[in-house]
Amino acid sequence: MAPEIQDWLDSFSTLTAVVWIAFFILLGVGIYRAWPVLSKFVATVNALGDLPAFMKRTDDAIEILRHQVENDHETNLRDDVTELIEKVDALAQSDDKQWEVIELTLPRDARGRFIKKEE
């Protein structure tokens, strides 16, 4: 064995070895106990780093939604919806009248079922 290594090993006492082993065990235990806190800290720092990109995506999505919801003209959206409901109701009533005319003019059998016209 090289003389430098032999001198180094001879200078090592049992007490020194115990102190170094205790130091490394305590270091390992400290890292083990601190790991959850460290991982949460790293996750928080990563989330803060991603925050500007997230805010940009959120702002873009809100702008798209705002464009879909806002009116393109001066009237109120509720007024437009009410007008559409009135038009649909009017169409439904006229459609009911047309069905009544169709039902009255088509031939039926004794049980009230529609009959195909033979040509």
Image (spheres, rainbow, N blue to C red):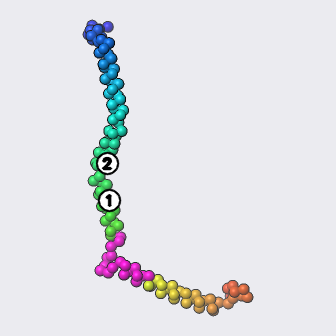
* Separation of marks 2 and 1 at Cα, in angstroms: 15 Å
Q: What residue does disc 2 label?
A: 47
Q: Main secondary structure of the magenta part?
A: helix
Q: Please, what is the three-letter code of the amino acid marked with disc 2?
A: Ala
Q: What residue does disc 1 label?
A: 58
Front in this rendered view, residue 52 or 27: 27
Residue found farthest to the right: 110
Q: x, y percentage for residue 46?
A: 31, 46
Span shown in magenta = 68-85
Residue at 31% x, 79% y: name it. 73
Check the picture and name the quadrant holding the C terminus.
bottom right
The magenta stretch spans residue 69:
yes
Q: x, y percentage for residue 88?
A: 47, 83
Residue at 35% x, 67% y: name it. 65
Q: Please, what is the three-letter code of the amino acid marked with disc 1?
A: Thr
Q: x, y percentage for residue 70?
A: 33, 73
